[in-house]
Amino acid sequence: MKQIKLVLIALILMISLSSVFAEDNSAAVYQLLGIDARSNGMGGTGTAFLDNVSSAYLNPAVLADVKTIEFTSGTRQNMAWDRNHNAVALGFVLPIGYVAASWQNATVCDIPGYDVNGNPTGDFSNSDNTIALSFAAKISKLNLGITPKFYLSNQDNDSDTGYGLDLGFLYHINRYFNVGMVARDLIASYPGEEDDIPIEFIPGVAAYPIPGLIIAADLSGRDNFKDSKLRLGVEYWLGVRDDAEVGSSLSGIRIRESTTWSDIISKVQAGIRAGVNDGAFTAGAGLRFKMLELNYAFQMAHDEYLNDTHSVSLLLRF
């Protein structure tokens, strides 16, 4: 009961902070989009539960719960102003922890160009990239993670570089509750920005009341929570049983059953999810096999100037 009260208090604090602060900061804004459709369908949550290689972006500490070599690829479609967002990540188990390499790309195409006199010079494109290497290790119930990042920006044949550093932790209270925190860009310099990229702190909680059900909440706060966004999500996997093998012995979410190659297709789990990301409704679904997982997410536009978006991600386990 005491642990349940602590989680409820954390949720109340997140909601309170979210209602107090509101200020926009657009530096490296593509990093706020998320690279995993499962997370996107749950309102962008994942700081305290998403134990797959996508956590290289969400919270590197969670990588310590990953048990296999994993590869993921994700894309977001129907973005406004000819924007594109894509990402890939590959992770390996080490004797002392888990390591993952990831790449994000955000591109804006067909930008009208003009000279100093206002004469058209033709269209050009802008491309921003984040290349990162994450490492996570487990100490009893505590996971620790670190992600150094390299930024590369290309605009109209001009290039610029920068850097960043993320730190995260995850604590398994028991098999029913996790709490986590990630601090993004604690040390950072972004291409083309006069000032350092703002630090983003994201505390999160996750609960697993019954097998297959996850309830999660994250509070994203940039620049000392002057710009904060509350994210809430829920997910349920059909076909998860009490006797299923749990990939993470503490988190209770990563489910795998003993199967052979011949029955991979026949033994499938289906997941449904919904959430709210800073007031925007999200929803999604997924199919999970022993070595493959495919997820889809829909996110409603935050305002009239943006589009409703669709994201898809593929996860392979080896």
Image (spheres, rainbow, N blue to C red):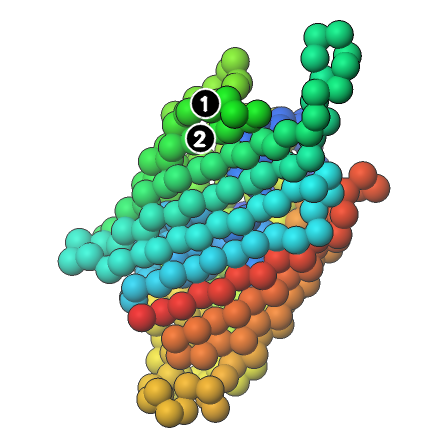
| Label 2 close to label 1 by CB (< 8 Å) | yes
The residue under the point 68% across, 63% down is: 283
Mark toward the start of the polypeptide (2 vs 1): 2
Distance from label 2 to label 1 (Cα)?
Answer: 6 Å
Horizontal arrangement in the rendering, residue 64 relative to residue 46 (left or right): left
Amino acid, disc 2: Leu
Q: Which mark is residue 152?
A: 2
Is residue 122 at least partly visible in the picture? Answer: yes
Above-or-below relation of 250 to 25:
below
Looking at the rendered structure, the secondary structure element under dot 1 is strand
The residue under the point 34% across, 36% down is: 148
The single residue placed furthest to the top in the displayed view is 117
* Mark 2, other Cα within 10 Å: few <14 / some 14–19 / many ≥20: some
- Asked where in the image residue 126 lies, by quadrant, the reply is top right
* Mark 1, other Cα within 10 Å: few <14 / some 14–19 / many ≥20: few
The residue that label 1 is drawn on is: 160
The single residue placed furthest to the left in the displayed view is 95
- Residue 87 in the image: state x and y as whole percent: 49, 50
- Residue 31 in the image: state x and y as whole percent: 53, 39
Between 134 and 107, the one nearer to me in the picture: 107
Above-or-below relation of 156 to 29:
above
